[in-house]
Image: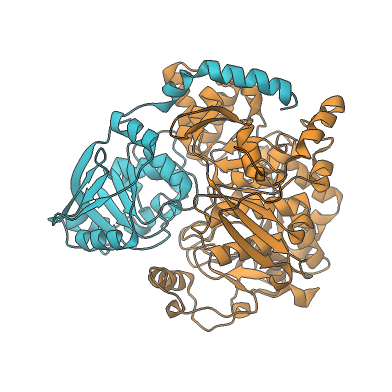
Chain colours: A orange, B cyan
Amino acid sequence: MTGPKTLYDKIWDAHIVSTSEDGTCLLYIDRHLVHEVTSPQAFEGLRLAGRKVRAPEKTIAVPDHNVPTTLDRVSGIIANEESRIQVDALDKNARDFGVVYYPVSDVRQGIVHIVGPEQGWTLPGMTVVCGDSHTATHGAFGALAHGIGTSEVEHVLATQTLIQKKSKNMKVEVTGHLRPGVTAKDITLSVIGATGTAGGTGYVIEYCGTAIEDLSMEGRMTVCNMAIEGGARAGLIAPDEVTFAYVMGRPHAPKGAQWEAALNWWKTLKTDPGAHFDKVVTLKGEDIAPVVTWGTSPEDVLPITGVVPAATDFTGGKVEAAQRSLDYMGLTPGMKLTDIKIDTVFIGSCTNGRIEDLRAAAAILKGKKIKEGMRAMVVPGSGLVRAQAEEEGLAQIFIDAGMEWRLAGCSMCLAMNPDQLSPGERCAATSNRNFEGRQGRGGRTHLLSPAMAAAAAITGHLTDVREMM
Amino acid sequence: MEKFTTLTGIAAPMPLVNIDTDMIIPKQFLKTIARTGLGKNLFDEMRFTQDGAEIPGFVLNQPAYRKAEILVAGDNFGCGSSREHAPWALLDFGIRAVISTSFADIFYNNCFKNGILPIVLPAEAVATLMADAQRGANARITVDLAAQTVTSSDGQVFPFEVDAFKKHCLLNGLDDIGLTLAKARAIDAFEASAAQARPWV
């Protein structure tokens, strides 16, 4: 391919092993992240076929989905037998096949998408895959990162490659600057609100514009994390000085002369002027408000100042889906979003479980108490995030406010561990999916930013955080 | 992987849009370390009450559709989680083809790894086939992968597109790991040159 290239084009071209006549490529994978839920069948497949892991030093395993996050987990085994078997299987597979491994007992354990960047495994210009849709997170570094199924996990384990067809290029530009109280979470939800959950299908998104450049690495990871909720294969942000500063000195980041060589290449990883995008979406940073979801699809996004819509506000198949959402969520059209009462607050997940997220929540909660009867938990994304939050005094703010301060894991984002909602229980969550039953059968999820979740914990209802700043 | 060539079977209508993989197979069933046995929990929370009783209104509980082999579904089927347990559950129940206007990317790819054919058709064609499926068990839809056609019970033929390589693998039931391992030399060569160009990786 000649002429100006997008960032996606450049990373793609640098990883082609071979190309077939029909355009199907064999793409080399630089980093393969592995967790306990989507890998056991893949390792079993290798065993049955007598195959090895081709590049164990590029394969990083960590249990996260099933692990309990209560403090007693350090002293005991996992009570749920099936969860225990799955975590034990990862333990055995990691050791048998010799891949890099962070067991539950390791302080570096955490959510796979938080551990990868934290340890410097994720670097600009890489291809990164994981049997998890939120692998899109790593795109924040200018790495081409996407989720795969278990068959493809096995394929990557055996060959360190994937059979791929190239996606189309989409540009999402967020111009200007965010207003106070508006965060990366509000950007990414607002983009999905604008494009719909299938708007990105068939595309790799590059997020750009001054409001994106303004973000920290944590914020950029939040934006890219939810690219998948917009249907995109991956989300990307061009690496810049913010990226390089984050990466420098991480345990597995290059050092010395290799750092200089890497930096020289990384600085070329940006879309050339005049490069072609198949689709362009533009949002004004100043127009983005703190948002919440009202329904059971991440596209059901509204500014917190809005009201619950009616099914008749929609067209086509969305009419039936919206009515189903309203029934499931127990909401009446026309009611103010700020009148929605909340039972539970969940702060954590690969979307918002990093240190900056905890700082944002703590800034709202400092010196305050959560609403009486409220259940609220803060689940740091990794053991190191937890340690840092304790050092910075954030943990004490949460504890003093009456919240539970947990150990690292995916927790109530998908409720595979004991952290679940009961039927009808309504949760303000900083996670990424408000699907029916996602956080527990019958549970009702409203997605929002960490600061907005903190505000709801204090008042007991969805709240415009700007009124508390 | 089982081959997919042609299929004539009962099609169950699921017009709801954005059916996500959490609906197809809820998280509590992801704790398995096997690929099989998930069919009994397919669409679990839509199909059964919390006590395990069947919900009569759900399409796959209706007598006409209990042996469905095809789903005709609303837009953006299979969105959300990458869990391959979703196609495993569909396959274990007996579903071999899903027809919709659009599929989420990861789910679409996962289907091909498991002998399930996801078929993208224009909205009008899906609407016709949805109406056909709603007629019940006597209305059998035919899918022919080699010819790339779907034929409604009254003989209307709808051509569809499918990637040539995916079609080849599905028609022949091929294990693509074996195919890729045959290119080991090219992978070795790539690794050698990448080690020069990007030694820090």
In the figure, residue A11 lies in which quadrant? top right
Q: Nearer the viewer, residue B38 or A177?
A: A177
Q: With A229 as the anchor, is B104 left or right in this view? A: left
Q: With A469 as the anchor, is A148 left or right in this view? A: left
Give the x, y percent position of residue A194.
57, 66
Which quadrant is the C terminus of chain A positioned in?
bottom right
Q: Residue at x 65, y 79 (%)?
A: A305
In the displayed image of the protein, which residue is found farthest to the front?
Answer: A3
Name above or below for residue A210 compared with residue A386.
Answer: below
Q: Nearer the viewer, residue A313 or A304?
A: A313
Give the x, y percent position of residue A76.
63, 37
Give the x, y percent position of residue A395.
79, 54
In the figure, residue A312 lies in which quadrant? bottom left
Q: With B42 as the anchor, is A358 left or right in this view? A: right
Name above or below for residue A244 compared with residue A218.
Answer: above
Q: Residue at x 68, y 75 (%)?
A: A463
Q: With A390 as the anchor, is A236 left or right in this view? A: left
Residue B120 appears in view: yes
Which quadrant is the N terminus of chain A positioned in?
top right
Give the x, y percent position of residue B123.
34, 61
Name above or below for residue A310 compared with residue A420.
Answer: below
In the figure, residue A177 lies in which quadrant? bottom right
Numbered marks: total? 0
Q: Nearer the viewer, residue A34 or B148?
A: B148
Residue A61 appears in view: no
